Amino acid sequence: MTIQLNQDEVRVLGCFIEKEMTTPEYYPLTLNALTTACNQKSNRDPAVAFDETTVVRALDRLRHLGLAMQAGEGGRVPRYRHALSVKLYLEPEELAVLAELMLRGPQTLGELRARADRMHPLKSLDEVEIILKHLAERKEPLVMQLPRQPGRKESRYTHLFAGVPEISEEPAAPAPEAATLRVRAENERLAALEAEVAALRAELETLKGLMEEFKAQFD
């Protein structure tokens, strides 16, 4: 089965994988938590501002393709999970690398190792290269190596869930200064905290609703 997704669907699928690996205590995800994850400022490129309608539309197509489903756990608020590992027989380390490519776009071996390691331990660049090689050599490839851009020392890799990307011939932008990197890191840290607080608030609202229903039984 050839999978062809749009960018919204790629973002939703990537968020499912990320949250399953980084915050399993909050997984499967409610629609509200999934929307918050899509709009998270940290570990995302580009940043987006999805509304729930956009997320529902993407989620519905992923469910139609068998890549996502409603979780079987009971509860007042529906929760959803991805089914990519079952559908495509993927290992955790492969899921981590794919999720990073879905959430941040094309990256080098070094970038993938540093960033995907938060989801699954990656011991070396060689390990990441082997993972990418396996994903690229599947009967239906899931990643590809991009031609090295002028001004870049290393090649980047991209996922193929949205098809083969257009190759830009423009030279790469200059590397940001150290001060810019520090500011960006701090912004990402704050954004991650904001996303966590938003998820906790959503869980609290759910608990409040359940408590009100429980109290109503004795009125």
Image (cartoon, helix red, strand yellow):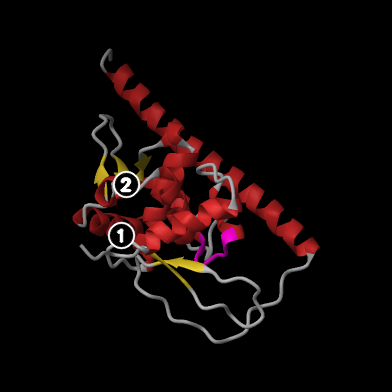
Residue at 46% across / 67% down in the picture? 158
Residue at 24% across / 59% down in the picture? 61
Farthest-out residue, bottom: 169
Residue 29 figure quarter: top left
Q: Quadrant of the C terminus?
A: top left
- SS at mark 2 in the image: helix
The magenta-colored residue range is: 104-109
Q: Position of residue 193 (x, y in %)?
A: 60, 43
Q: Position of residue 59 (x, y in %)?
A: 29, 54
In the rendered image, residue 105 lying in the magenta stretch gets the answer yes
Q: Position of residue 70 (x, y in %)?
A: 25, 42
- Location of residue 56 with respect to 121 vertically, above or below: below
- Location of residue 82 with respect to 57 vertically, above or below: above
Q: Quadrant of the N terminus?
A: bottom left
Q: Say which mark, if any, is on residue 85.
A: 2
Query: Label 2, label 1: how many angstroms apart (C-alpha)?
Result: 18 Å
Q: From this viewpoint, is residue 60 visible?
A: yes
Residue at 51% across / 78% down in the picture? 147
Residue at 25% across / 16% down in the picture? 217
Question: Which label lies toward us, 2 or 1?
Answer: 2
Q: Position of residue 58 (x, y in %)?
A: 30, 59
Q: Pointer 2 and pointer 1: residues touching (CB < 8 Å)?
A: no
Mark 1 neighbour class, 10 Å CA radius: few under 14, some 14 to 19, many 20 or more: many
Question: Mark 1: which amino acid?
Answer: Ala
In the rendered image, residue 170 lying in the magenta stretch gets the answer no
Q: Which residue is mark 1?
A: 58
Question: Mark 2: which amino acid?
Answer: Ser
